[in-house]
Image (spheres, coloured by chain):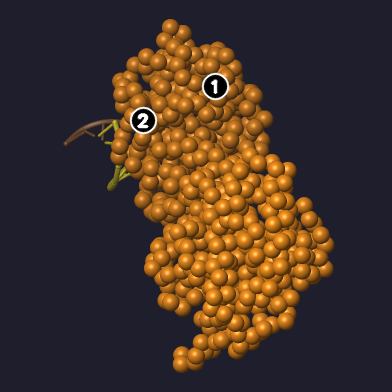
Chain colours: A orange, B brown, C yellow
DNA sequence: GATTCCCTAAACAGAA
DNA sequence: ATTCTGTTTAGGGAAT
């Protein structure tokens, strides 16, 4: 996916040299890329693009008319069937003289113009238009132009077929003329032509397809081929004929078949999908007829088009905002290198080396977009162009310091936004085995898991652990045995593993030595998930603060995020204490013997885990409530 | 350079 | 006998 996108971008670049015929490729590819990537342009002016696009189409039509009127170009072959179809088309083409591009632009630019106002305005235009309908004679002229376009289209289509081996054309064979074409354009193709020429046929479609429209192209032929090519995939093969970017072939082909297969964005299930229409059309031909008759370029259609345009625009704005939010989230959660700057030096947590490694491992860039997409894993998430593939990510070998562990970043908050990513992408999670094991355990309903259940959690949560089972399972067992924080408890159904959070926190606290925290907080519960404090700082402070939680004198009110991280870390322990106090009395006696409850106000401690729970274990959410009880046992003797 | 942390590999034993 | 589970040791890489 990512590679494809990248390659395509490259291909497009190279195709730029290929003249107008490659514009369609740029258009399609550009729109796809634009939508899947940063979409910096989408927010800029979708409407403007449409304006320009429509202007372009209108101007092109005009120029075509002028050209033909002056040159007296005649249609190579009159086609009755096509002629009948041309009527509405020609009418539509005449409208540029009725509604000038400037006027059209005005209409379109008036974002605040109400449909009623627009309607009134267009009615005026209509009056003028009626006067000029007598110019219908020019329809024939334009029809000729259409035929020329058809020729180009069909020739390119044939070239496409030739390339596919469906048709064999000897090298010396002269290019096909329209007369020699096996058959005329299908109604769908003609419709496409009309659609493209009018430029307002389907705004949504236009918005999508024209995301990368090069509006700088003004000459008639360029415009014509551009619009035609983007509508009719065969054109893109014209560029292929020129020896360009074969990578686009497949995609184009598929779309080509779709479009020529009597499918239409405005037609489905026997119903015209024009906004507010829903007229029943027996077949595609009838639909086309209906489309030409009922949805020609008139005031009503224009108004509807504009409405649809706004709908699309709103959606794009929304998408843009959501994407921005996602980016911010990822930046916040992954791009530690830029964040830790303000991090208190005493923490001594910043390691450029580690960070860079972490970046390579978990930076948003590496996130597939949605691995779902691979999804990118899902994520679905449409991801911007990424140069880091999952393969390259895990190929870096064993990661010593999992940044989340190192910085005590809540694993949930780390995984949550990338859950689908880790679930689908073969990328090693940036956590130590101990951290993961703990997470698996505390996520469980009763805070205890058998070894096999831990295995399952690993494979279920991370695609990476679906392979090399022997290695990581051994590591899991090794960690369970090695770390005191993991306590084996004999259960009715066998041995289960629990987490001794005191030990766990103790161990982690030891990682941060020589730091006398001056900032420890009183945890404001109201602080939200989106607290601004960067996670690493939060985590560091949180961890550092653990021993001090019981000492009110050392507790200062600071930022929210801090508590968040603290909560997360504490949650596990507290949860563990709470739940296991009953379920597994035998484990880790000390934690139950003297649980010093540092009673903070009930915290929304699970903000970090909520996202995770939403996508992972359904049974996790219900526990959030009990998780909020913070019972930390931060007595100094335990910490040290 | 020493220490620590983490990972990986492997040997081994006991239980299922 | 095989597999699973659990423990332990060893060594290497990376960070501190």
Q: Is residue A629 left or right of residue A175?
A: right
Instruction: Name above or below for residue A437 compared with residue A385.
Output: above
**Number of residues whose C-alpha sits closer than 10 Å to that of mark 1, classed few (under 14), some (14–19) or many (20 or more):** some
Instruction: Name above or below for residue A486 compared with residue A279.
Output: above
**Number of residues whose C-alpha sits closer than 10 Å to that of mark 2, classed few (under 14), some (14–19) or many (20 or more):** some
Which one is in front, A23 or A389? A23
* Alpha carbons under labels 2 and 1: distance apart: 21 Å
Instruction: Name above or below for residue A147 compared with residue A215.
Output: below
Q: Indicate the secondary structure of the residue bearing disc 2.
A: loop
Q: From this viewpoint, which residue is outermost toward the top? A: A553
Q: Residue at x 57, y 80 (%)?
A: A72
Instruction: Name above or below for residue C6 compared with residue A630.
Output: below
Q: Indicate the secondary structure of the residue bearing disc 1.
A: loop
Whether residue A260 is visible to the viewer of this picture, yes or no, is: no
Which one is in front, A379 or A627? A379
Whether residue A335 is visible to the viewer of this picture, yes or no, is: yes
Q: Which quadrant of the view contains residue A592?
A: top right
Q: Residue at x 68, y 54 (%)?
A: A125
User: Where residue A54 sits: x, y (%)?
Assistant: 58, 57
User: Where residue A223 sits: x, y (%)?
Assistant: 51, 66
Q: Residue at x 62, y 61 (%)?
A: A97
Q: Earlier in the sequence, mark 2 or mark 1?
A: 2
Which one is in front, A260 or A352? A260
Q: Chain of mark 1?
A: A
Q: Is residue A233 left or right of residue A566?
A: right
The residue labelled by disc 1 is A527
The residue labelled by disc 2 is A340
Which one is in front, A110 or A387? A110
């Amino acid at each position: 996916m990512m590679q494809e996108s990248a390659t395509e971008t490259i291909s497009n670049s190279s195709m730029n040299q290929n003249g107008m015929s490659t514009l369609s490729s740029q258009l399609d590819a550009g729109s796809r890329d634009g939508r899947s990537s940063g979409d910096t342009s989408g927010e800029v002016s979708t409407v403007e693009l449409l304006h320009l696009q429509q202007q372009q189409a209108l101007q092109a039509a005009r120029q075509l008319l002028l050209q033909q009127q002056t040159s007296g170009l005649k249609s190579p072959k009159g086609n009755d069937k096509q002629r009948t179809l041309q009527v509405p088309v020609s009418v539509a083409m005449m409208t540029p003289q009725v509604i000038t591009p400037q006027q059209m632009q005005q209409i379109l630019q008036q974002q605040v113009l109400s449909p009623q106002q627009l309607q009134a305005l267009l009615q005026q235009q209509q009056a003028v238009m009626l006067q000029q309908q007598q110019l219908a004679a020019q329809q024939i002229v334009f029809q000729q132009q259409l035929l020329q376009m058809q020729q180009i289209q069909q020739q390119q289509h044939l070239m496409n077929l030739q390339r596919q081996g469906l048709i064999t054309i000897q090298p010396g064979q002269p290019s096909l003329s329209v007369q020699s074409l096996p058959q005329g354009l299908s109604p769908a193709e003609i419709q496409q032509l009309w659609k493209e020429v009018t430029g307002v046929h389907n705004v949504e479609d236009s918005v999508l397809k024209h995301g990368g429209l090069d509006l700088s192209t003004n000459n008639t032929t360029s415009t014509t081929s551009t619009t035609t090519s983007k509508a009719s995939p065969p054109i893109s093969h014209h560029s292929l004929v020129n020896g360009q970017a074969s990578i686009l072939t497949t995609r184009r082909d598929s779309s080509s078949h779709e479009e020529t297969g009597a499918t239409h964005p405005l037609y489905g299930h026997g119903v015209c999908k024009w906004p507010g229409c829903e007229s029943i059309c027996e077949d595609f031909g009838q639909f086309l007829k209906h489309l030409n008759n009922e949805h020609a370029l008139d005031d009503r259609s224009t108004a509807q088009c504009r409405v649809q345009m706004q709908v699309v625009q709103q959606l794009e704005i929304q998408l843009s905002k959501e994407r921005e939010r996602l980016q911010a989230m990822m930046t916040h959660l992954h791009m530690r290198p830029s964040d830790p700057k303000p991090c208190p030096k005493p923490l001594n947590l910043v390691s450029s080396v580690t960070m860079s490694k972490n970046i390579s491992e978990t930076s948003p860039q590496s996130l597939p977009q949605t691995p779902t997409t691979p999804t990118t894993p899902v994520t679905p998430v449409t991801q911007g162009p990424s140069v880091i593939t999952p393969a390259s990510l895990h190929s870096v070998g064993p990661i010593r310091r999992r940044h989340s562990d190192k910085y005590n970043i809540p694993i949930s908050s780390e995984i949550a936004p990338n859950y689908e990513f880790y679930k689908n992408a073969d990328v090693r999670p940036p956590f130590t085995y101990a951290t993961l094991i703990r997470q698996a355990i505390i996520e469980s309903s009763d805070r205890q898991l058998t070894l096999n259940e831990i295995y399952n959690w690993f494979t279920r949560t991370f695609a990476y652990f679906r392979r090399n089972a022997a290695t990581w399972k051994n590591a899991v067992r090794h960690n369970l045995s090695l770390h005191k924080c993991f306590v084996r408890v004999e259960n009715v159904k066998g041995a289960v593993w629990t987490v001794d959070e005191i030990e766990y926190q103790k161990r982690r606290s030891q990682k941060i030595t020589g730091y006398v925290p001056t900032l420890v907080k009183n945890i404001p519960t109201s602080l939200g998930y989106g607290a601004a404090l960067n996670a690493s700082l939060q985590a560091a402070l949180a961890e550092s603060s653990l021993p001090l939680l019981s000492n009110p004198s050392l507790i200062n009110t600071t930022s929210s995020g801090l508590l968040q991280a603290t909560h997360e870390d504490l949650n596990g322990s507290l949860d563990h204490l709470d739940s296991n106090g009953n379920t597994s009395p035998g484990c880790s006696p000390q934690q139950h013997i003297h649980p010093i409850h540092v009673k903070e106000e009930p915290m929304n401690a699970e903000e970090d885990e909520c996202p995770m729970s939403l996508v992972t274990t359904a049974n996790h959410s219900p526990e959030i409530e009990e998780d909020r009880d913070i019972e930390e046992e931060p007595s100094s003797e335990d910490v040290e």
